[in-house]
Amino acid sequence: MSRRCGLIAALDTTDPSQAAGWAAAVAPHCGMVKLGLEFFLANGVAGMRVAGGAAVFLDLKLHDIPNTVAGAVRAVLPLRPRMLTLHAAGGAAMLAAARTAAEAAGEGRPILLAVTVLTSLDPAALAETGVAGGPRQQVLRLARLAMAAGADGLVCSPMEISALRDALGDAPVLVVPGIRPAGAAADDQARTMTPRAAAAAGADWLVVGRPITRATDPAAAAAAMAAEIAG
C-alpha cells in the first residue's frame, strides 16, 4: 500500500442512542465517523454530539443553486465537521461558491468532497438518467470539473480509484464507500471492493456502514477491517 488509508464508520440510523453506542464502540479503530442525511434530518444540530469527540464526516450531499449551497455551507461551519459532501453534478459555479463560503472558517474549514457517481448506480441505472458511457467516464468528467472548481477531494466507488489516481495524481482526497469484506452481502451497492484492495488502489478513506453496524460485535468488526486496511 503506497499511502496511508483510514477507516470511517457510517452511523446510518435515526436513533441517537444507537449512533452514540456505535461511535463509542468503533472509536479505537476508526479515524472518523459519518453522519448522513437520514441522521441529520432526524436529529439536527444537537445530534452531532453522538460522535463523542470523534471527527465527523458530515455527508449531506448538498446540491442546489450556488447561493443556496453557499448558505448551507456557512450554516454548518459552526459544527466544525472534518469533511462535508456536495454533488459534483451541481456544477462548477456551485462548487466554487461552496469553497468560498468554507474559506470563512479559515484553517479549520471542512474538507470539501465532491460526490461523483453514487455507488448504487450501475451502467444501466446511470443510462436511465441520460448519462451514456458508463460510470467511469462520468466519474472522471465530474472529478476534473470538481477539482478545478475548488473541491479538496472526491467521493467515488472503489472501481474508479485507480483511474482517478492516474488522471489526477495524489491531489484529491479520495473517500470511498461501497466497501465490503470478502463474502459479505453487497446490499444496495453496485460497485464494491474489499478493504485491502481499495486501500491498495489508492484510497485515503474507506466508508463502511452495515458490515460494521450490523455485526454482532461492531467493535470487533471495525478492528478486523482496520487490520485488513493496514495489511
Image: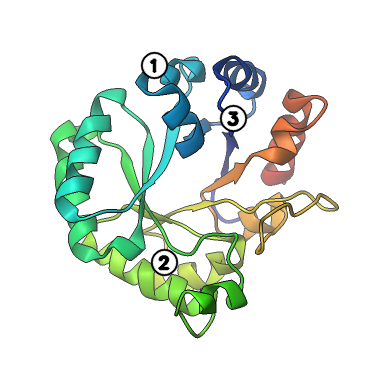
- Residue 99 in view in this figure: no
- Identified at 57% across, 56% down, the residue is 2
Secondary element under disc 1, as helix, strand or loop, is: helix
**Quadrant location, the N terminus:** bottom right
- Residue 70 in view in this figure: yes
Q: Which residue is mark 2?
A: 169
Q: Which residue is mark 3?
A: 13
Q: Quadrant of residue 144?
A: bottom left
The amino acid type found where label 1 is placed reads Ala
Figure colour scheme: rainbow
Measure the C-alpha gap from mark 3 to mark 1.
15 Å
The amino acid type found where label 3 is placed reads Thr
- The disc, 1 or 2, on the residue closer to the chain's N-terminal end is 1
Secondary element under disc 3, as helix, strand or loop, is: loop
Residue 88 drawn above or below residue 47: below
- Identified at 75% across, 54% down, the residue is 186
Identify the disc placed on residue 46: 1
Residue 173 drawn above or below residue 75: below
The location of residue 136, given as percent across then percent down, is 52, 75
